Image: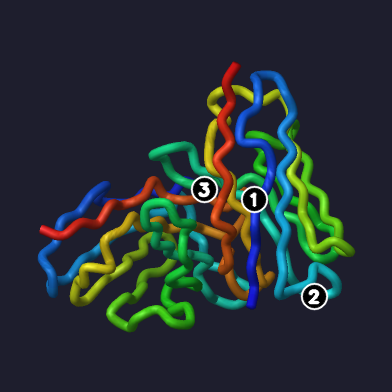
């Protein structure tokens, strides 16, 4: 299985400031057939299912604000929120869908400082 | 509009078999490059991918749980079923079903989830 490791486990950022969450995979998730990284980011708020934010490492899902962005390739990836808003408080997960079983990171809890 | 909803027992006893149903609308599992999968989340923990079935009846399972899981689809009813045998308290979790447009996106639509507690 590909192990996904996120850092940090929790993060407190002031409103309007930048938040950065990292995700590292135990092996490359670069898909040679399309030269895209099979890496997704999800946001989960209490009592809700995960919401897809980013896929192919950097493609924003429809309706996701452009202050959220994804980057990285191979084994190292980053989710950046450029200017933290109150509604961004949540747990964020990275996921690889390169192979089976698709695996998730342990989650990063984002709070307001 | 794509929606999914999980249903099934909220409480099962150890050693029993769990059967969950995912009823969906807004898409068809036949014929289109679509899959429906199951993911679970123990209280306060991360997400665990369990299984997926695709439009062509291709099925994939978590290797860790493969001998306990069966996923099936009923295209006429717009349903996907997940069966898990020999339930244990560590299987207590919220179980989600989710939609995937194959080869383009990971799971993009999720049900609200159903909490299953395993206890005697």
Q: Which residue is mark 3?
A: A2
SS under mark 2: loop
- Image coords of residue A100 (percent x, y): 64, 51
Q: Which residue is mark 1?
A: B38
Q: Which residue is mark 2?
A: B32
Q: Quadrant of residue B12?
A: top right
Q: Quadrant of residue B5?
A: bottom right
- Image coords of residue B76 (percent x, y): 89, 64
Sequence-wise, the earlier of marks 2 and 1 is 2
Q: Looking at the image, which residue is at 72% across and 37% down?
A: B66
**Quadrant location, the C terminus of chain A:** bottom left
Q: Looking at the image, which residue is at 14% across and 62% down?
A: A13
Cα distance in 3D space between marks 2 and 1: 19 Å
Cα distance in 3D space between marks 3 and 1: 18 Å
Query: Is A88 situated left or right of A47 in this image?
Result: left
- The disc numbered 3 marks a residue on which chain? A
């Amino acid at each position: 299985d590909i192990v996904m490791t996120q850092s940090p486990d929790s993060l407190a950022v002031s409103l309007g400031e930048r938040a950065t969450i990292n995700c590292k995979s135990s092996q490359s998730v670069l898909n040679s057939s399309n030269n895209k990284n099979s890496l997704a980011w999800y946001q989960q708020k209490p009592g809700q299912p995960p919401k897809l934010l980013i896929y192919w490492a950097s493609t924003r899902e429809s309706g996701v604000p452009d202050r959220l962005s994804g980057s990285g390739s191979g084994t190292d990836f980053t989710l950046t929120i450029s200017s933290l808003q109150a509604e961004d408080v949540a747990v964020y997960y990275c996921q690889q869908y390169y192979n089976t079983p698709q695996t998730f990171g342990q989650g990063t809890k984002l709070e307001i400082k | 509009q794509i929606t999914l909803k999980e249903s099934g027992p909220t409480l099962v006893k150890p050693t029993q078999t769990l059967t969950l149903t995912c009823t969906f609308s807004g898409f068809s599992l036949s014929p289109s490059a679509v899959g429906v999968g199951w993911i679970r989340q123990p209280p306060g923990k991360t997400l665990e991918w369990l299984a997926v079935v695709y439009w062509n009846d291709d099925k994939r399972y978590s290797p860790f749980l493969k001998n306990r899981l069966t996923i099936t689809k009923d295209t006429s009813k717009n349903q996907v079923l997940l069966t898990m045998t020999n339930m244990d308290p560590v299987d207590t979790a919220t179980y989600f079903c989710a939609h995937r447009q194959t080869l383009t996106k990971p799971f993009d639509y999720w049900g609200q989830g159903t909490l299953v507690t395993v206890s005697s």
